[in-house]
Amino acid sequence: MNPAEETINTTDYVEAPPAPKRTRMQEFRRTLGQNRLAGLGFIIFFLFFCCAVTGLVLTSGSKPAFDPSMVRLEEKLRPPLSKPNLKALRPDQVPVLNVYLMGTDDLGRDVFSRMLQGAWVSLTVGFVAVGISVLIGIFMGGIAGYFGQHHIKTVHILFFLCLIGGTGLIIANFTVIGTVILLLCPAYIFYSQLTRHGSTEKETPALKAMLHSNAVSVDTLIMRIVDIMLCFPSFFLILTVVALLPASIYNIMIVIGLTSWMGTTRFVRAEFLSLREQDFVAAAKALGLSTFRIIFRHIMPNAVAPVLVSATIGIASAILTEAGLSFLGFGVPPPHATWGNILSNGKNFIFDAPWLTFMPGIAILIVVLSFNLFGEGLRDILNPKLRERY
Amino acid sequence: MIDRRPTNDWPLLCVENLKVYFQSNGERARAVDGISFEVREKETVCIVGESGCGKTVSALSILGLIPTPPGEIVDGQIIFSGQNLIKLDEKEMQKIRGNHISMIFQEPLTSLNPVFTIEDQLGEAVKTHKSINAEELNRYCIQLLNDVGIPSPEQRLNDYPHQLSGGQRQRVMIAMALSCDPDLMIADEPTTALDVTVQAQILKLLRSIQQKRSMSILYISHDLGVVSAIAHRIYVMYAGIIVEQGNTDQIFRSTRHPYTQGLLASLPSLSKRGKRLYSIPGSVPNPAYKPAGCPFHPRCSHAILSCQDEFPEMCDYGEGHQARCPVLFKSKGYKGPNEMLKNTMS
Amino acid sequence: MESKNKNDHSILRIEGLKKYFPVRRGFLQKIHGWVRAVDDVSFEIERGKTMGLVGESGCGKTTVARLILKLLESDEGKIIFQARDISRFSEKEMKPYRKEIQIIFQDPFGSLNPRMTVGQCIEEGIRISGIKHASRRKERLEDLLKMVGMSPDSADRYPHEFSGGQRQRIGIARALSVEPSLIVCDEPVSALDVSIQAQIINLLKDLQDQLGLSYLFISHDLNVVGYLCNTISVMYHGHIMEFAPSEDIFNHPCHPYTISLLSAIPDPDPDKKWYVKLSNGPISDSDGVLEGCKYQDRCSIAETACRKDRMVFEKVGENHFVRCWKAAKNI
């Protein structure tokens, strides 16, 4: 037979994906290329991160290269890019590169060094606060979304109330009453263990039935807590808490985190509600996987896309909140610099030394804008991938 | 090449060498890669093919409904009543849509606007293209609903889409498509989402409407059974090209392209019980990564060396039956689907 | 249906399965009525054989699948799997049985986790089946992929890179990873193209021959069911209307619903003229029928007697049962 006329296909056919494989790097580069603004936001964020880290290194220690707290009263309110008056300064007071890059403030401190120090604060506050809020939000949202229809019995609510009430009373020095209430809890546990196997009464007394009735579903409980938290004007709440607690950067971070988890909860819950009905979750259940594994290994990676977007925007918001707190004087105590308190300081000299206000103001603007752009871009990047169909 | 016979069977719609490409994600998907077909008066033409073959894109491009940032009509003409539809601008196309050419879609659930009543939606197309007062419109709508077989149409007019069943919604869509008495109706898989019994009723309805109104229907489908029930002529598409065309008898009794033969052979039925079902190996190529030469050759049991390099031309078997496979044309022997099964079982 | 004592032949037997969903209306969410999704369903699947469950959308076949897999709790009835009644098993008691019954889904797009690679997806099952060594697990993964006709380097790709048919193969590999004895196929080929359908049907058949699997094949497509299944149950609004071996369903259908279903299928054979025996009256898709035969609204031979009692299964042939007293009489 003419070799040109022989059939070329054999019957062995192995399935392969129809398109060649694209590495993660290629995909990432292409999506960033398409989304110019997001790319820009990412670059600025990266620069900011580098500044903050190097700033921390350069401004900490006993003899830092850029000293943010070096007071030079002779050099106060010098404009940016001005040369120092070498005759009036000691050798160790002369700034690096022999120029005040961003001028000096009313105590002669180098604004550039203070900005570097403040960058680190802003970064930490942003990430830690958002980290806390995201963790709480994912946890609460996941529980509400997955276990939503489970009900909590009245007995359990009473148990919990006794626990908290008892402990609270003990702390508030009402020891006797507090202990009595607290003791109700182990008593209940003991009682329920005893009667676990013996309850085959035909009539359950009304009280018992009421106690064992389904009071509220998990979803309702968590969502109402979210609603309550949302009722508080968060900035004033933060202000109040910060005013009561000892002033420290950690308290601020924790408080901001504890008051901004609500949005994340809602997103995660919404994603869980829709993902729970998908076939791949049913398949995982059919395989016999544990609930924990299904929630965290199977559903969660699909549910975090909107969380990432809101987290990046949340970082921007946390930085702004911290700046606001510092501006009002409730932030990190002096002499530690943050962008907020440089701004706050500068408001007294706004006509004499406008750079004191503009420098931190523009820096905050650029950082917040870049985070917002990056977050928006992330939203676009993450969305089509999930909906891709061949 | 289209056979332009100067008879009164001048085609109502004539598509020549249509090419529609999509650009996305750095890939150029050649969804429709040079197809030519025609629809004459009073006939039902079916375009059959599996998902990804480009049939829906072809239908949408007739009415200019392809979104133009990713999609683009790169080449070809669409001649309808003497005009090239590709060259018309949006305003002129709007005069044709709904009026001379209308379309019904696959998902009746999402094709009807959930916040408007049936009367609003039915009347909208009529009001756009004709001047008519409210009372006449109402009577016309009732008559339309009657024509499509919806019981108690007066009450149905005030219902919203979610109050109707899937079959009834599809009938409303058909009524909307008929409202301006079009010359051509394009139906894009209208019965795929419906149950078998409802599908049967809708197909019966389409057949009777076509006869009553002397309309032409361009029916897109993947279901060979449906196609055999209503088509006069059939075009089989694969990977953006037409691989076979002919009338229903020719396609089902003496098919001449390996793909069509494979499709027919792979239909399951009770009579094939106990024997292995023929299946075409492999899957439909990604429109951006089509094989060179004949796009079907990697899956074809008749493929020879030249199939990898040369793009096959249409071979004429007479009486309008053409197939794009020179290998089978040369061998001239007809292999029915069952014969094919025997030969490829090795 | 008589429950024959063939415990060694039947792998699954369902008796009187019921699942009702409450319809809640109003501000206080009071129960207004019930949707009787699955209403007194009984059938039997023999070991190594395939039973088809046919019906149109909304008839309850998917609910039956979920009840058998214990993804939903049934209200009444028995599910006897390998001679044990698993219908009231707790989650803990069900654990060893989870491996034995698996499911393949209809939608190839939703049935695979978009964030896990193919390999990770199948490995979830391999982990459960208790293989300890990582290298043996990798071997098993490659074996499974080969068994379903996929190349082994598909393991580190994501589901969205594959076509519908290929994803369905991956779903089958996942189901096989725990070595089940019964697989519930919930319309596995309905969303696939014709040429791919045939591939998957052949694959399922091959796997049944190779591994001795039993299938419950749910579909609305009578042709596929006729080709693949040994016995067929025809379901309508939660009731099984007819049960028979495949040849009998096609050659001697008794129930009016079965007859109308069969006639509605357009046959690509050009020699067969397509003549549709349609039912009378409008298609009602509400569950308004409370008493009597569920099909009375659409039935062409319905009488007043059909509106009174619940119909019972009547035997009309060897292993052939019909839930219609009139059809049974006419035989």
Image (cartoon, coloured by chain):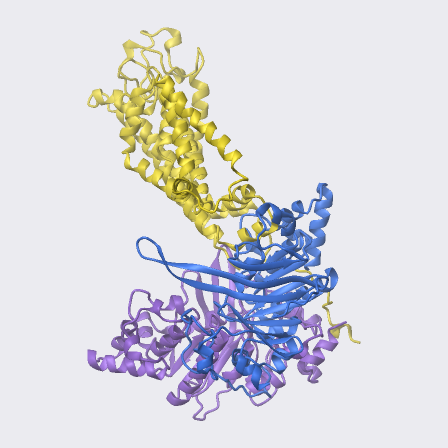
Chain colours: A yellow, B purple, C blue
Query: Residue furthest toward the front?
Result: A202
| Whole-percent x, y for residue C78 in the image | 58, 59
Pick the front one: C74 or A266: C74
The tally of labels here is 0
Query: Residue furthest toward the bottom?
Result: B7
* Quadrant in the picture for residue B118: bottom left
Q: In the visual, does B146 lie left or right of A381?
A: left
The relative height of residue A83 versus residue C237 in the rendered view (above or below) is: above
Q: Which residue corresponds to the image point at 51% horizontal and 60% vertical from the top-left?
A: B28
| Whole-percent x, y for residue B31 in the image | 51, 67
| Whole-percent x, y for residue C319 in the image | 66, 75
Q: Is residue A373 visible?
A: no
* Quadrant in the picture for residue A332: top left
Pick the front one: A290 or A181: A181
Query: Which quadrant does the C terminus of chain B fall into?
Result: bottom right
Q: Is residue A90 visible?
A: yes
Q: In the visual, does B199 lie left or right of C14?
A: left
The relative height of residue A294 versus residue C102 in the rendered view (above or below) is: above
| Whole-percent x, y for residue A222 in the image | 39, 40
The relative height of residue B242 versus residue C98 in the rendered view (above or below) is: below
The relative height of residue A184 versus residue A28 in the rendered view (above or below) is: above
Q: Which residue corresponds to the image point at 51% horizontal and 77% vertical from the top-left?
A: B47
Pick the front one: B47 or B323: B47
